[in-house]
Image (tube, rainbow, N blue to C red):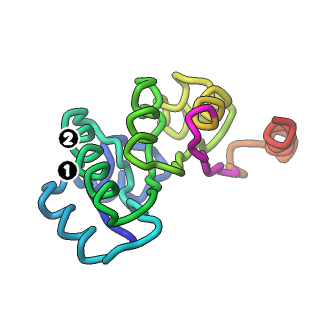
């Protein structure tokens, strides 16, 4: 099943269409979220298709997790996945709480392992925690971390991109 708990993103990455749209980040009402989950019917897996499931309102994030945990225990789904930004990993208990609520997979736009590229993309939030640490913490929590990379052929040389891919495959 696919549901949405929030809309848009609270970051302004230079390459993102959401930045161009200039829409504010919105937390959807928890009653609406409950109705969406119920409308999907009982499922094995629920995917939260939010652009940024974590967001900028910690209390609302915790309330979402509480509702998700409740609905999982009632049998609406066995596990879930969500899309988060790297600031999610700044608070170590977020992984534990997500796992307790049934999270099995997270997607995060890593974009690059090169700090200069991240700054150029206006992804400064991705420069705070080393990406390899994020992967390790997810694995330790029993959560699969799926990620995306950008091959910036306009600003990076083929050699730089190849080096980054060698780094990825060596880890």
Q: Is residue 59 above or below residue 145?
A: above
Judge by depth and name the residue closer to the eye, 120 or 96: 96
Q: Is residue 45 above or below residue 88?
A: below
Whole-percent x and y of residue 151? 70, 51
Q: Residues within 10 Å of mark 1 (few under 14, many from 20)?
A: some
Q: Residues within 10 Å of mark 2 (few under 14, many from 20)?
A: some
Q: Is residue 121 above or below residue 17?
A: above
Residue at 82%, 44% (x, y): give it: 165
State which quadrant residue 73 falls in. bottom left
Q: Say which label, 1 or 2, has the lower sequence index.
A: 1
- Mark 1 touches mark 2? (CB < 8 Å): yes
Query: Is residue 166 at least partly visible in the picture?
Result: yes
Q: CA distance from mark 1 to mark 2?
A: 7 Å
Image: magenta residue range: 140-151
Residue at 38%, 35% (x, y): give it: 97
Under tag 1, what secondary structure?
Answer: strand
Query: Is residue 116 at least partly visible in the picture?
Result: no
Disc sitting over residue 60 in the figure = 2
Disc sitting over residue 27 in the figure = 1
Quarter of the image with the C terminus in it = top right
């Amino acid at each position: 099943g696919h549901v949405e708990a929030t809309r848009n993103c609270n970051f302004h990455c230079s390459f993102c269409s959401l930045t161009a749209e200039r829409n504010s980040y919105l937390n959807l009402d928890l009653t609406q979220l409950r109705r969406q989950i119920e409308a999907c019917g009982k499922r094995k897996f629920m995917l939260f298709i939010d652009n940024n499931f974590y967001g900028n309102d910690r209390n609302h994030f915790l309330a979402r997790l509480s509702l998700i945990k409740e609905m999982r225990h009632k049998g609406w789904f066995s596990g879930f996945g969500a899309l988060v930004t790297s600031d999610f990993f700044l608070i170590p208990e977020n992984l534990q709480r997500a796992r307790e609520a049934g999270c099995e997979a997270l997607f995060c736009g890593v974009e690059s392992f090169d700090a200069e590229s991240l700054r150029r993309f206006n992804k400064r939030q991705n420069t705070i925690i080393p990406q390899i640490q994020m992967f390790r913490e997810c694995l330790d929590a029993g959560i699969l971390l799926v990620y995306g990379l950008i091959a910036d052929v306009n600003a990076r040389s083929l050699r730089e991109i190849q080096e980054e891919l060698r780094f990825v495959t060596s880890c």
